[in-house]
Image: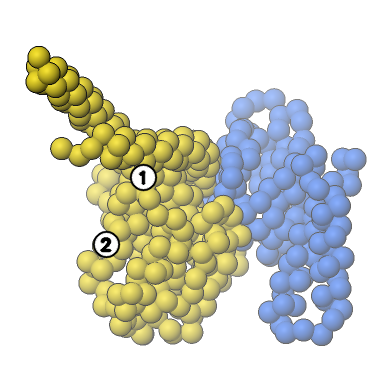
Amino acid sequence: MASMRDIKRRKGSIQSTQQITKAMKLVSTVKLQHAKTGAEQTKPYSDCMYETISQVLKKAGNIDHRYLKPGESDKAAIIVITSNKGLAGGYNSNVIKMITGSDIEPAKAMVYAVGRKGKEALARRGYNIAADYCEVINTPLFSDACKIGKDVLEGFANGEFGEIYLAYTRFKNTVSHIPTMLKLLPVQIESKENEAKDEKPTIDDLTLMNFEPDADEALDMIIPNYINSLIYGALIEAVASENGARMQAMDSATSNAEEMISDLSLKYNRARQASITQELTEIVAGASAIN
Amino acid sequence: MDDSKLFNLKVVTPNRIFYEGAVEMVELKTTEGDIGILKGHIPLTAVVSPGALIIKETDDTKEAALIDGIVRILQDSVTILAQSCEWPDEIDINRANEAKIRAERRLSGQEGEVNFQRAELALKRSITRLEVADKYK
């Protein structure tokens, strides 16, 4: 059995670790609240944007636009949103696993990394890091999203890659965060809308959409806007997910520490009891030897 | 005033829902020029350029600075997706002034075309803000 002093020392170190994890949990809880309100405020804009784009494209008829078809290059750009700091459970590794598990080969991928963890992990696995926006994830601004959007669109226009993906963690609720891979370009509007369109079409659905300036030019302006808003929404949700994941991880770390401490307390008391018993036996044995 | 002339207006920015309600008329500036929208406008999607946004409610008129975005007009609803939209009392006049001077300096210098375009847009934005703020001082 370990000595009393060893057990005491071990207990002390676990206790101080527990204090840290507890504090980190509290901090991320507060940050999560902030991020959650942020995500809720952004949601109407992203939703509206998505609705607008899908309606516009549906009504626009068959427009042949460069953003609507894949580019000639077989490379793909991936915007990877992870965190700068670790200790967030599986948050970062889930995103990375999703990318390595996808059918994009490392040699054909250009990674636009937001967040240091994702960048480092992907660089180790032989992915090409095209750009790095590590500072952005601390406090994402709409202008940051615009900058990333502009950079990837430039690459797409120059033919550096033919597809753009966005990999991030979707914030479903406080306990459930889903790593998601989204195709940004060429623009794809999910077909689920067609399935749901069995009800009677309204007047708005039947009339043809007009564009000003003409459809091509308007889409030139609208699609970058759409992409920026998607990136911004993803950034905000990723921050919320990060703090949610960290909160959970720290919560379980704290309760694990609690368990270990109670286990060690028991051992300590046992050791103390054993040493007292031993002392008594020795005294009694000594006394009987004299008599 | 009867309700038949009213339609639904929604102005959304990345940070908040800026305005939502039934209005009589909306005036704004697109890349092709100023437009006024009444109920029953043909479906139209247009690109917004920086300018004043005038909202006419039944018995009130509101004005705001609208910066970049798109407007989608349907039969009985108008949605403006703006990158930024501000009421006159939210505009930071000093900042707008500084931005204006900065943009003007850049325009008078000799730089690449991309910078030129950006400076021009920045100038338009700052002028819009200043104009709207000026009217409601």
- In this view, the residue farthest toward the top is A291
Give coordinates of residue A285: x percent, y percent.
Answer: 10, 21
Nearest the camera: A165 or A271?
Answer: A271
Q: Residue at 46% across / 58% down in the picture? A: A84
Q: Secondary structure at mark 1?
A: helix
For the C terminus of chain A, the quadrant is top left
Where, by quadrant of the figure, is residue B33 drawn?
Answer: bottom right
Where, by quadrant of the figure, is residue B98 drawn?
Answer: bottom right
Residue contact between numbered discs 1 and 2, judged by CB atoms under 8 Å:
no
- Other-residue count near label 2 (Cα within 10 Å), few / some / many at <14 / 14–19 / ≥20: some
Nearest the camera: A30 or B77?
Answer: A30
Give coordinates of residue A230: x percent, y percent.
Answer: 46, 57
Which mark, by number, is residue A98? Answer: 2
Give coordinates of residue A111: x percent, y percent.
Answer: 40, 73
Which mark, by number, is residue A245? Answer: 1
Q: Secondary structure at mark 2?
A: helix
The hue in which chain B appears in the rendered picture of the protein:
blue
The mark that comes first in sequence, 1 or 2, is 2
Q: Name the amino acid type tagged 1.
A: Ala
Chain letter of the residue carrying label 1 = A
Q: Residue at 87% across / 65% down in the picture? A: B101
Chain letter of the residue carrying label 2 = A
Vertical comparison of B19 with A286: above or below: below
